[in-house]
Image (spheres, grey):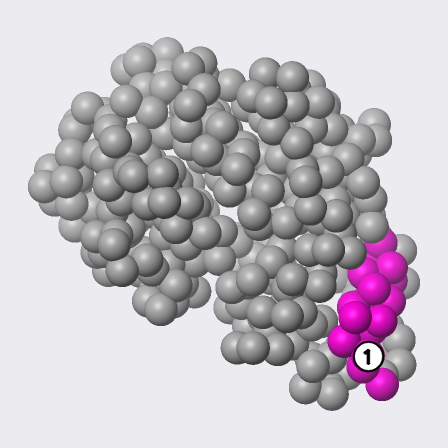
Amino acid sequence: MKILITGGAGFIGSHIVDRLIEEGHEVVVVDNLVTGKKKNINKKAGFYKADICSPKLEKIFKKERPELVSHHAAQIDVRKSVSDPVYDAQVNILGMINLLQCCIKHSVRKVVFASSGGAIYGEQEAFPASENHSLKPVSPYGIGKLTGENYLYYYKINYGLDYVNLRYANVYGPRQDPFGEAGVVAIFTNKMLKGEQPIINGNGNQTRDYVFVEDVVEANMAAIQRGVSDVYNVGTGRETSVNELFRHLMEITKADIKEVHGPGKKGEQLRSVLDYGKISKECEWEPRVSIQEGLKKTVEYFKNK
């Protein structure tokens, strides 16, 4: 199958590209390289340096005629979405509409969308959150992801475009950028290995559901095979506080640093954890990598960078 993946030079997207090629698919990457890196792109993949907001995207679709689109290009920093909501909406909402217009014009069969379980539910009322949890995002980033899901439903009803929305928990692992992306695991790991002092925002009791990138790739493979349009959480069902994460990484890196706290950040949720029961039951997907094992693999990657 020919698959076009937006954001295929980025952290999650590049891992999916590798797996798709391993499975024998023909893969085309579209990435503007604002946060993605060309060195992440598998040499067997086609590549276009292009923005999803650009009219150039339509020409790429016309030439390549993909059967399926994996949409991972995005402005992914929650804090940046708070400081610059206009830019966030231009990329995450208008860029997605541009992409979906290309899909219907050039007969794409299905879209797999990287949504956000970490941001879309807002301050949770139930723990862990299922896909039926109320949707009350507390950041422009979360609002953008919810809007993307709503547009996919619209395009399904009106044009027959199939979709799978994957609501990711907090994804971490090798290739996560400690500078261009808002990944706390990458930021802490990078600083600790350099002997620099990481700062924990607020009291550090805020929790997240950390899911390893290899597990996320397998969820995408399951979504590609899935025949119906639906939405799935992709997480571990386990909460880890920022303080716990900090201590895990201190132990693995053997960093000689103190636990230092700074002011809290506006728009940051207190608790986030996802129920993955639906994807487990319907797609036979399970998270296989524990937080300890995943952090060790991540630290090893940064050591050898």
Residue 72 higher or lower than 49, as above or below: above
Relative to 82, is 257 on the left or the right?
right
- Where residue 251 appears, as percent x and y from the top left, is 84, 71
Under tag 1, what secondary structure? loop
Label 1 environment density (alpha carbons within 10 Å; few <14, some 14–19, many ≥20): few
Question: Residue 145: in sight, yes or no?
Answer: no
Which corner quadrant holds the N terminus? top left
Is 240 in the magenta?
no
- Where residue 143 appears, as percent x and y from the top left, is 57, 39
Task: Residue at 73%, 79% (x, y): give it.
Answer: 192
Relative to 284, is 29 on the left or the right?
left
Q: Which residue is mark 1?
A: 254
- Where residue 50 appears, as percent x and y from the top left, is 24, 56
Question: Residue 59: in sight, yes or no?
Answer: yes
Nearest to the observer: residue 220 or residue 209: 220
- The quarter of the displayed image where residue 209 is located: top right
Which segment is the magenta one? 241-256
Nearest to the observer: residue 65 or residue 280: 280
Residue 161 higher or lower than 26, as above or below: above
Relative to 20, is 180 on the left or the right?
right
Q: How many marks?
A: 1
The kind of residue tagged 1 is Lys
Task: Residue at 80%, 31% (x, y): give it.
Answer: 128
Q: Main secondary structure of the magenta part?
A: helix
Task: Residue at 42%, 32% (x, y): give it.
Answer: 112
Task: Residue at 73%, 38% (x, y): give it.
Answer: 236
